[in-house]
Image (cartoon, helix red, strand yellow):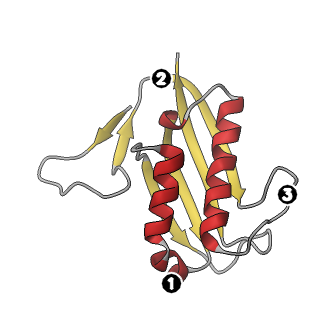
Amino acid sequence: MQALLPAGWKAPIGYANGVAVEAGRIVFIAGQVGWNAQQVFESEALAPQFEQALANILDVLAEAGGQPRHICRITAYCIDRPGYLAARGELGAIWRRLMGRHYPAMSMIFVADLLDHPAKIELEATAVIPR
């Protein structure tokens, strides 16, 4: 995977503007919320839900034979913009613990609500596992 940074652009922090990958096995991971394998929320707080949602992404990816470094894109949907901004340091620490220094293309979208209550954040991902 190659992170794309056009000449003269300031480097983004915590994500890539774009990525290029060679063809391989493409894995599309549906939106994952912060519940456990039994679909039970263990916390209503944003950071623990983020951690669980990201762990769920990685569990689904592992089922396909992938690793965190194979994730090319993550889209996050969050219902709490002030809470997200206040928790950025904690979320970054969770990210580095689970993903290391791998930063795919990412989008953060703030929404009015999510389907599964009391979800505060939902993550979906696309990965490419090399041949």
Quadrant in which residue 111 is drawn: bottom right
Q: What is the three-letter code of the residue carrying label 3?
A: Gln
The amino acid type of the residue labelled 2 equals Ala
Determine the residue located farthest toward the left in the rendered image: 8
Whole-percent x and y of residue 126? Answer: 56, 42
Residue that numbered label 2 is attached to = 23
Determine whether label 2 and label 1 are within 8 Å by CB: no
Q: Closer to the N terminus: mark 2 or mark 3?
A: 2
Q: Which residue is mark 3?
A: 39
Q: Looking at the image, is mark 2 or mark 1 earlier in the sequence?
A: 2
Crowding at mark 2 (Cα within 10 Å: few <14, some 14-19, many 20+): few
Q: Is residue 40 left or right of residue 99?
A: right
The x, y position of residue 67, in whole percent, is 56, 32
Q: Secondary structure at mark 2?
A: loop
Q: Is residue 37 left or right of residue 110?
A: right
Which label is found at residue 10? none
Residue at point 43%, 46% (across, down): 104
Report how far apart the C-alphas of labels 2 and 3 lie in the structure: 33 Å
In whole angstroms, how far apart are the C-alphas of marks 1 and 3?
Answer: 26 Å
What is the quadrant of the N terminus in the image? top left
| C-alpha gap between disc 2 and disc 1 | 39 Å
* 45, above or below 22, in the image: below
Helix, strand or loop at label 1? It is: helix
Residue in the foreground of this view, choosing between 48 and 60: 48
Disc 3: CA contacts within 10 A as few (<14), some (14-19) or many (>=20): few
The residue furthest bottom is 82
Residue 82's label in the rendered image is 1
Give 23 or 54, whichever is nearer the viewer: 54
**Picture residue at 88% right of the left edge, 53% below the top:** 38
Q: Position of residue 122 (x, y in %)?
A: 65, 62
The residue nearer to you, when weighing 110 against 101, is 101
In primary-sequence order, the first of circles 1 and 3 is 3
